[in-house]
Amino acid sequence: MNITLKTTNSENNRVHKTFTGGSSSFNFDFKDESSVFTPSVIIGTTSNLTGYNYAEISDLGRKYFITDIIVLRANLYMLKLKTDVLSTWADQLMSTSAVLRRQENIYNLYLNDPEFKVLNKEQIVTKAFSGTGFSKNLQFVLTVSGN
């Protein structure tokens, strides 16, 4: 299998990461039995891998954070990886529509949110009709104004 190593300065919770520098591809083997979600891979190379913090394994269709780099011996590295869930499934996440219960800047006052306090008081103002107010047919005009 093939793994591509990259370097990113983006926050872990950012969906679309930006990468600095170039990327390098290597052939690798899994360490014994390995999880797809948190795999450990072994790479034999003369390159220094300690500058990388992000990986992509296209055969598995996943993107990973590099959580640890262990030098096993000269020119042999073990990388411990953890799936970057947001970037791996970014296309599916971005195409999803949802009703949000809470958002950082835009509030939906129609949804119950115990963290966002809203004061709602009914304000009634009564004004007298000018003149008689009613016609002979008992018709009247009602005007309602609100914010």
Image (spheres, rainbow, N blue to C red):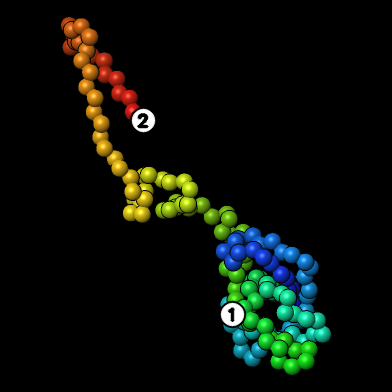
How dense is the environment of label 2, judged by Cα within 10 Å: few (below 14), some, or many (20 and up)? few
Residue 5: image location, x then y, percent: 73, 74
Residue 130: image location, x then y, percent: 22, 9
Question: Which quarter of the image is occupied by the C terminus?
Answer: top left
Tell me which residue sits at (57%, 54%) in the image: 95
Name the foreground residue: 90 vs 52: 52
Tell me which residue sits at (33%, 45%) in the image: 118
> Is 35 drawn above or below residue 101 in the view shown?
below
Is residue 6 shown left or right of residue 106? right
> Is 136 drawn above or below residue 85 in the view shown?
above
Tell me which residue sits at (68%, 72%) in the image: 54
Locate residue 60: give its quadrant. Answer: bottom right
Residue 123: image location, x then y, percent: 25, 31
> Would you name the residue on which mark 2 appears?
147
Residue 21: image location, x then y, percent: 77, 66
Circle nearer the viewer, 2 or 1: 2
Q: Amino acid at mark 1?
A: Thr
> Would you name the residue on which mark 1 appears?
38
Q: Amino acid at mark 2?
A: Asn
Locate residue 48: give its quadrant. Answer: bottom right
Name the foreground residue: 61 vs 3: 3
